[in-house]
Image (cartoon, coloured by chain):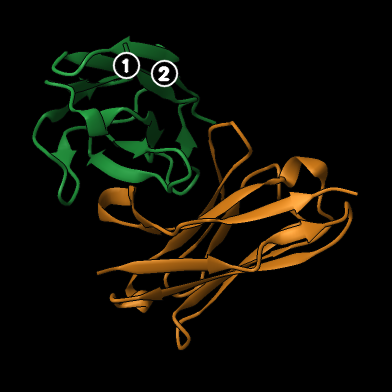
Amino acid sequence: DVQLVESGGGLVQPGGSLRLSCAVSEFTFSDYSMNWVRQAPGKGLEWVSYISSSSKTQYYADSVEGRFTISRDNAKNSVYLQMNSLRDEDTAVYYCARVGIGGSLDYWGQGTLVTVSS
Amino acid sequence: DIQMTQSPSSLSASVGDRVTITCRASQGISNSLAWYQQKPGKAPKLLLYATSKLGSGVPSRFRGSGSGADYTLTISSLQPEDFATYYCQQYYRSPMYTFGQGTKLEIK
């Protein structure tokens, strides 16, 4: 079965940095674009960032542009999210998700919690 | 940005009921719409894509329809496992995805 497993979440102070990882298995990772989507406590889903299969293109939500960087390593079947200058409002569960048919997000990881607090 | 508006925000229903959730985009999205189901503490699960195509392993009681800017998710006969929160998502402007605010389906 397709698996996506996030790691790297935790408690960080405002202004700090954190790097999230998402390790995937049971599919040809280099064929698929990937995303990060987050969900603040008790809130809805917010798309954060996208990376194409070859890393040629990346996109970011306005709320994280200039602070977050998405990357991937196709040899390691992993996608990453480097988060700098973290703010209270970045507190959320962060999910990685695969782009499926037509652009929907067909597989999601279980999420990793990031808490930004002093 | 394309805004997605779901209604209702919450809904109470009984096992066996038929329920409908609507999603309106701020512009036409050419059937580039997906629906997700999320249970507490779990990741979202893809239910439908391209408005009406079922995701892998999704029961046929879930149906999607719509066109232009207006879309609906219908569950024909609610089962106990269907009580969850549902989100629509546009991917017309992929990868600048936007989600609806969610509809919480609760047991009456």
Residue named by callout 1: B22
Question: Which residue lies at the image location 35% right of the left edge and 68% below the top edge?
Answer: A3
Mark 2 residue type: Gln
Q: Out of A56 and A69, give the one closest to the viewer.
A: A69
Can you say whether A22 is above or below B90 in the image?
below
The chain to which mark 2 is attached is: B
Q: Is residue B92 left or right of residue A49?
A: left
Q: Is residue B13 left or right of residue A24?
A: left
Residue A56: x percent and y percent?
A: 51, 71
The chain to which mark 1 is attached is: B
Which chain is green in the picture? B
Q: Secondary structure at mark 1?
A: strand
Can you say whether B4 is above or below B38 in the image?
above
Label 1 crowding class (10 Å Cα cut-off): few <14, some 14-19, many 20+? Answer: many
Asked if the residue under mark 1 is in contact with the one under mark 2, i.e. CB atoms within 8 Å, the reply is: yes
Residue named by callout 2: B6
Q: Earlier in the sequence, mark 2 or mark 1?
A: 2
